[in-house]
Image: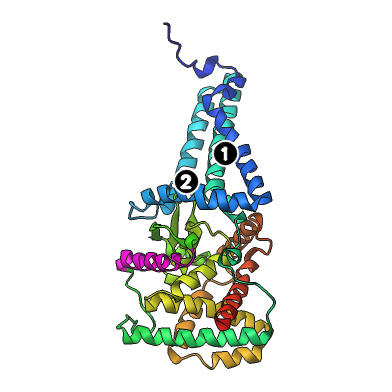
């Protein structure tokens, strides 16, 4: 049988750019849109079919592979992206110069480039939808956990915040009595060189709560410390869930006591809980019920910061009463955290990053944008009332 080689660029017609086999990759985009629509109109599909079955298979398989790499694959991809873009543009320019006298060839090359870019975008969109996007439409964690979200009085908020402060004080003291590490200034310190041990503690904490909430089960260990953490801080980002590699990426340049809570938050995303308020609450739930006092303290301080901010907005006088219950050690940790973040406030980078994050959240069914982080307090109040009534 006679074999035919691909025609040289000088012989092709412009429309042959659409004859490439890869053109079928463009179908992934409408397929993705359909499943996003289906998840939005049918929450049972999003939860019972996708989140609990299809997603778990994808997440376990991809995170199992990415966990084998000691570095953040997200960082590698972000670094390589501009390099590949520049090389691609350079190659296109070279081809255009080479065939500048043949208008048909130039038309073909330009269309082929557009087709290739569209195919890549279609594949990435498909990956995002099936590795993250659909999960924005699953059941709320309040529904899964059985917590009753209802209106609460300022007194309820005050009592809960007092309770969080007292629990945080006990956890902080427990770190000292169990031989925890501290900086020369007396702040909580974490040995980040032993990252695997910290990840193992988080995995153990998730396994413990998984007995209560089966949806939190899963041997997901792909949690990475980011080398360019300082850059993340400049963008006011503490962690990123990267769906393309199923990695939880954590900023480790921040104040140490906050790191376990960030890990818990990103690991909640890895388990398919994409809403920010829910990921925060799950992190608090996991960390505060852990057997590790550092995790306990981190989760409780996360909850205390959100509850305290809401209480201050409602009743500054009650907030001052709560703050008076902070131990000297808690206050020192909070001061360290404040002075760390104040250096990044209102910069061009942080403002741009917050704008992008706000638009991303709104595009993913979180209409309040970055304000949705505050709704964690509703879950905290629901848990507090449930515990008080038992």
Residue 146 visible (yes or no): yes
Towards the viewer: 311 or 288: 288
Label placed on residue 81: 2
Mark earlier in primary sequence (2, 1): 2
Give the residue pinned by disc 1: 122
User: What's the magenta region?
Assistant: 193-213
At 36% from the left and 68% from the top, the residue drawn is 201
At 44% from the left and 48% from the top, the residue drawn is 77
Rendering quarter of residue 173: bottom left
Towards the viewer: 181 or 90: 181
Q: Secondary structure at mark 2?
A: helix
At 65% from the left and 46% from the top, the residue drawn is 38
Label placed on residue 385: none
Q: How is the image coloured?
A: rainbow
Where is residue 111 shown, x and y percent of the image? 60, 28
In the figure, is residue 15 to the left or right of 335?
Answer: right
In the figure, is residue 316 to the left or right of 130?
Answer: right
Residue 224, magenta (yes or no):
no
Quadrant holding the C terminus: bottom right
Image height of 186 relative to 71, above or below: below
Identify the residue at the far top of this view.
1
Identify the residue at the far front of this view.
390
Image height of 199 relative to 179, above or below: above
Residue 201, magenta (yes or no):
yes
Disc 1 packing (10 Å; few <14; some 14–19; many ≥20): many
Where is residue 20 shown, x and y percent of the image? 54, 24
Most prominent secondary structure in the magenta stretch?
helix
């Amino acid at each position: 049988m006679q074999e035919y080689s691909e025609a040289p660029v000088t012989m092709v017609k412009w429309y042959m750019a659409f004859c490439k086999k890869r053109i079928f990759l463009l179908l992934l985009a409408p397929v993705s849109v359909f499943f996003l629509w289906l998840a939005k109109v049918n929450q049972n599909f999003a939860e019972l079919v996708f989140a609990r079955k299809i997603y778990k298979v994808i997440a376990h398989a991809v995170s199992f592979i990415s966990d084998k790499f000691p570095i953040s694959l997200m960082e590698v991809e972000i670094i390589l992206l501009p390099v590949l873009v520049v090389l691609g543009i350079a190659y296109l320019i070279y081809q255009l110069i080479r065939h500048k006298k043949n208008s048909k060839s130039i038309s073909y090359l330009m269309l082929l480039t557009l087709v290739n870019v569209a195919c890549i975008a279609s594949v990435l969109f498909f990956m995002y939808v099936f590795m993250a996007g659909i999960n924005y439409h699953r059941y709320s964690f309040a529904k899964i956990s059985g917590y009753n979200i209802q209106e609460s009085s300022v007194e309820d908020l005050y009592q809960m915040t007092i309770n969080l402060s007292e629990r945080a004080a006990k956890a902080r003291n427990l770190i000292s009595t169990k031989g925890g590490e501290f900086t020369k200034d007396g702040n909580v310190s974490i040995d980040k060189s032993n990252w695997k041990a910290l990840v193992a503690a988080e995995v153990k904490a998730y396994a413990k709560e998984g007995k209560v909430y089966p949806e939190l089960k899963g041997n997901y260990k792909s949690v990475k410390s980011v080398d360019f953490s300082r850059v993340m801080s400049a963008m006011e980002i503490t962690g990123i869930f990267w769906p393309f590699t199923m990695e939880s990426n954590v900023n480790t340049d921040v104040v140490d006591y906050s790191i376990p809570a960030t890990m818990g938050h990103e690991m909640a995303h890895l388990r398919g809980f994409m809403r920010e308020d829910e990921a925060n609450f799950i992190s608090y739930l996991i960390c505060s019920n852990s057997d590790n006092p550092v995790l306990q303290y981190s989760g409780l301080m996360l909850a205390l910061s959100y509850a305290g901010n809401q209480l201050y907005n409602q009743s500054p006088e009650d907030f001052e009463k709560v703050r008076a219950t902070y131990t000297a050690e808690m206050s020192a940790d909070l001061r360290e955290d404040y002075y760390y973040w104040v250096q990044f406030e209102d910069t061009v980078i942080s403002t741009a990053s917050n704008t992008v994050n706000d638009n991303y959240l709104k595009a993913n069914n979180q209409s309040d944008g970055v304000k949705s982080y505050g709704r964690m307090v509703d879950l905290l109040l629901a848990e507090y009332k449930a515990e008080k009534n038992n």
